[in-house]
Image (tube, grey):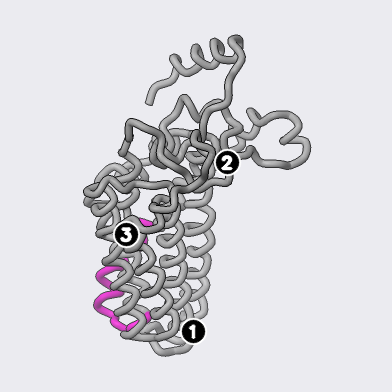
């Protein structure tokens, strides 16, 4: 699932891209209408349709439509890069569909286990289903959500999020580990849904590796989030309000996970703040 992410995360177009946010771009407009018809985005619409068909089926039919959606995900990034059609709409569309699809796979796998239609013994069916649902929350929602918050809102560099741990470095830096882990994570769920013990057992090591990598990363960035919270404006900390997108000057000093077009226009800083942040930036290393 990382192909589209990598294609857009490393793209640096000369001119700012139009964005989907409610804040207008330099031209005074939001998202450009033609972005809706970009080939890469049309592929993502196909992913939504196939996921809908998967949800309305079960067993091998679910696996078939889910696999079609997953295969389409392998091509949208290449299409966006080859046709120079990276867009903020495509970036967030792909990211949301990735999370929804993984959550659906784990949810239906848990249902299959509880129904007794899998090779999982009845005595351990409830704990296995509970583990799958915990992973929906911890890995797909909390861990990925925290990473997106830090990178998108606060502009924290990806290498500050758990790279001190070997498992996180291998998961994010080595494409072989990343591909193996992502395919295995989906394969394990599909193995349970189709009641295919060989597929589930082959996928289990990669499934566990991806889950541990994301949970480790979550544990590593919790202190980082607390550290960043101290830097929020006093009125936001007092009211329990989180920083709004673009409200942090630090967006200009770190490479976020999103493409450069997804970054909002930086608001002006005073000369004193600029000098102090510049000296602080120069003392950091990536």
**Residue at numbered disc 2:** 23
Main SS, magenta region, reads: helix
What SS does tag 1 mark? helix
**Residue at numbered disc 3:** 182
The range drawn in magenta is 193-210
What SS does tag 3 mark? helix
Q: Position of residue 84 (x, y in %)?
A: 27, 45
- Picture quarter with the C terminus: top left
- Label 3 crowd (10 A; few <14 / some 14-19 / many >=20): many
Toward which corner of the image does residue 41 lie, by quadrant?
A: bottom left
Viewer-side label of 1, 3: 3
- Distance of mark 3 from mark 2, alpha carbons? 34 Å
Viewer-side label of 3, 2: 2
Mark closer to the chain start, 2 or 1 = 2
Which residue is pictured at 43% across the width and 36% down the height? 256
Vertical comparison of 226 with 190: above or below? above
Q: Is residue 266 visible?
A: yes
Viewer-side label of 2, 1: 2
Which residue is pictured at 45% across the width and 71% down the height? 104
- Distance of mark 2 from mark 1, alpha carbons? 46 Å
On the picture, is 55 further left or further right than 8? right
């Amino acid at each position: 699932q990382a192909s589209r992410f990598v294609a857009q995360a490393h793209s640096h177009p000369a001119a700012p891209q139009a964005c989907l946010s409610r804040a207008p771009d330099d031209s005074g407009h939001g998202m450009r209408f033609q972005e809706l018809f970009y080939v890469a985005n049309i592929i993502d619409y196909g992913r939504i349709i196939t996921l809908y068909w998967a949800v309305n089926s079960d067993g091998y039919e679910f696996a078939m439509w889910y696999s079609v959606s997953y295969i389409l995900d392998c091509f949208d990034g290449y299409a966006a890069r080859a046709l120079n059609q990276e867009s903020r709409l495509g970036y967030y569309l792909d990211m949301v569909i990735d999370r929804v699809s993984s959550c659906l796979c784990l949810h239906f796998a848990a249902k299959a286990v509880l129904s007794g239609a899998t090779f999982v013994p009845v005595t351990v069916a409830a704990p296995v289903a509970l583990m799958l649902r915990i992973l929906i929350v911890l890995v797909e929602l909390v861990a990925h959500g925290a990473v997106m918050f830090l990178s998108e809102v606060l502009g924290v560099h990806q290498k500050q999020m758990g790279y001190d741990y070997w498992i996180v470095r291998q998961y994010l830096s080595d494409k072989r580990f990343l591909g193996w882990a992502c395919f295995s994570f989906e394969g394990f769920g599909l193995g349970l849904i189709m009641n295919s013990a060989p597929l589930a057992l082959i996928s289990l090591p990669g499934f566990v590796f991806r889950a541990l990598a994301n949970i480790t990363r979550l544990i590593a960035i919790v202190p980082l989030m607390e550290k960043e919270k101290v830097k929020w404006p006093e009125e936001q900390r007092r009211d329990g309000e989180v920083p709004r997108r673009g409200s942090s000057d630090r967006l200009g000093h770190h490479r976020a996970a999103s493409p450069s077009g997804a970054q909002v226009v930086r608001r002006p800083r005073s000369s004193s703040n600029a000098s102090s942040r510049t000296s602080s930036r120069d003392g950091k290393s990536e």
